[in-house]
Amino acid sequence: MNPLHLGQTSALPVSPEAAVLDYVPNPRTGRPYLVRFTAPEFTSLCPVTGQPDFAHLVIDYAPGETIVESKSLKLFLGAFRNHAAFHEDCTVGIAERLVAEMMPVWLRIGGYWYPRGGIPIDVFWQSGEPPAGLWVPAQDVPGYRGRG
């Protein structure tokens, strides 16, 4: 496992499909622990109008044999900037790719999308039940309230 991005200058991938995610060995295999990545400025494009969509993503996972390298994850998420897809496709697609490649013990994602057309959309997905004994804190992202 030789990370392609760590310690290197890396350009933003042209698409999520073209993005290469790097994985490194889990330094604490056999111990249940949770890793959280928060991307409060995630962007993609509406596939109908081409207008930008914005979300606050929270990715929680319990590592298996590998962990995802954070710079490659940042580049992967950044590749959605010019990617046209519905909220559901972006959110679940990110999780499914991580699960397929990294093979974590457990993973969940919360996609808290900002409103377009007056309706915020929140999308949630998880790979199954969390392992016994794993501390899984609440994501604590409040629902959208507007100017309240």
Image (spheres, rainbow, N blue to C red):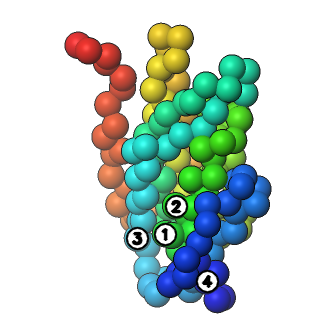
Tell me, yes or no, if residue 88 can be seen here.
no
Provide the residue designation for mark 2. Answer: 74
| Residue contact at pointers 2 and 1, CB within 8 angstroms | yes
Provide the residue designation for mark 1. Answer: 70
Quarter location, residue 84: top right
Provide the residue designation for mark 3. Answer: 33
Provide the residue designation for mark 4. Answer: 3
- State left or right for residue 138 relative to residue 42: left
**Which of the numbered marks, if any, corresponds to residue 59?**
none
Earlier in the chain: of badge 3 and badge 1, it is: 3
- Secondary structure beneath dot 3 equals loop
Amino acid tagged 2: Lys
Q: Residue at x 47, y 10 (%)?
A: 118
Earlier in the chain: of badge 2 and badge 4, it is: 4
Earlier in the chain: of badge 4 and badge 1, it is: 4
Q: Residue at x 35, y 60 (%)?
A: 135
Of residues 113 and 103, the one drawn nearer to the viewer in this rendering = 113
